[in-house]
Amino acid sequence: MGKRKLTGAQTNLLLALLASSAVTVIIFTIRVVAGDSWRYLFMVWNLFLAWLPLVFAWGLHRWLRHGRWASWQGILLTALWLGFLPNSFYILSDFIHLGATGEIGLLYDVVVLTSFIFNGVLLGYTSLYLVHRELLKRLPARYAHALVGAVLLLCSFAIYLGRYLRWNTWDILVNPAGILFDVSDRFINPAAYPRTFSTTASFFVLLSMMYGVGWFFVAAVAAAGRASQTE
């Protein structure tokens, strides 16, 4: 019975995420019609990219029910998840595009961008939560938490690479040497790139704070649910 309830909860969550993304696309479509402009079309692509980590994390979660993490399937799904995860959080930096355009009211654009960003970040954290739970099944809590912290740090650095150096996930395959050069140069000559570390640290604090609150919120809700069942 417990397994059926979990499946139902997962289904409801998936439907809620799909509905939320659909509402965002509708809000964007209204802007296209009312403002006669496709200005934020790239946000639709960014939202699509934000869905991919959840797809890979869910695939990994399903695989680990009967397979080993050290198998090629587990490693591939983990690599794909980790490679695309920064896209979910990179969408936070798209607030930089917000400004008066004369096409539609500025406050409506605030709603449009916030809706995209909310969904992207939510998808990223949902995928991270799935992987985090799998880590806790296999590692002491402090190591699992540390690995999640390392993932958020990598994502924060990836946001810097994407926003300022314009690298993206596909470049890992298309131009790995170029990425390696830019990354290594910033660690060899850190004083020459102060923005690298300030941007990475800022996003790391933000992402960690948001995830930490979400983690304890989910834990509190789950504990309240278990308590009500025992009454």
Image (cartoon, grey):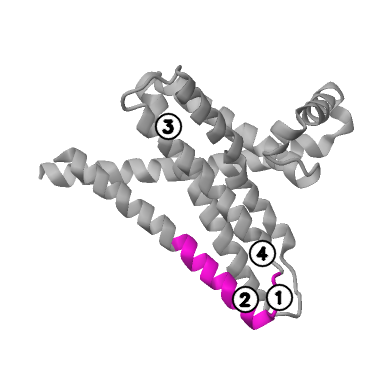
Indicate the quadrant where residue 31 lies. bottom right
Point out the tag, 3 or 1, that comes first from the N-terminus: 1
In the image, 15: left or right of 86?
Answer: left
Q: Which mark is residue 31?
A: 2
Quick one: label 4 or label 2, which is nearer the N terminus? 2
Give the SS element for disc 3: helix
Q: Badges 3 and 1: C-beta atoms under 8 Å apart?
A: no
**Residue at left 80%, top 44%?**
164
Residue type (three-letter) at the residue carrying disc 2: Arg
In space, the residues marked 3 and 4 are separated at their CA atoms by 30 Å
Task: Identify the mark at residue 37; answer none if there is no mark.
Answer: 1
Residue at numbered disc 3: 60
On residue 41, the disc is 4
Label 3, label 1: how far apart the Cα atoms are: 39 Å
- Taken as a whole, is the magenta stretch helix, strand or loop? helix
Q: Residues within 10 Å of mark 2 (few under 14, many from 20)?
A: many
Q: Does the segment drawn in magenta span residue 23?
A: yes
Residue 45 on image: x %, y %: 62, 56
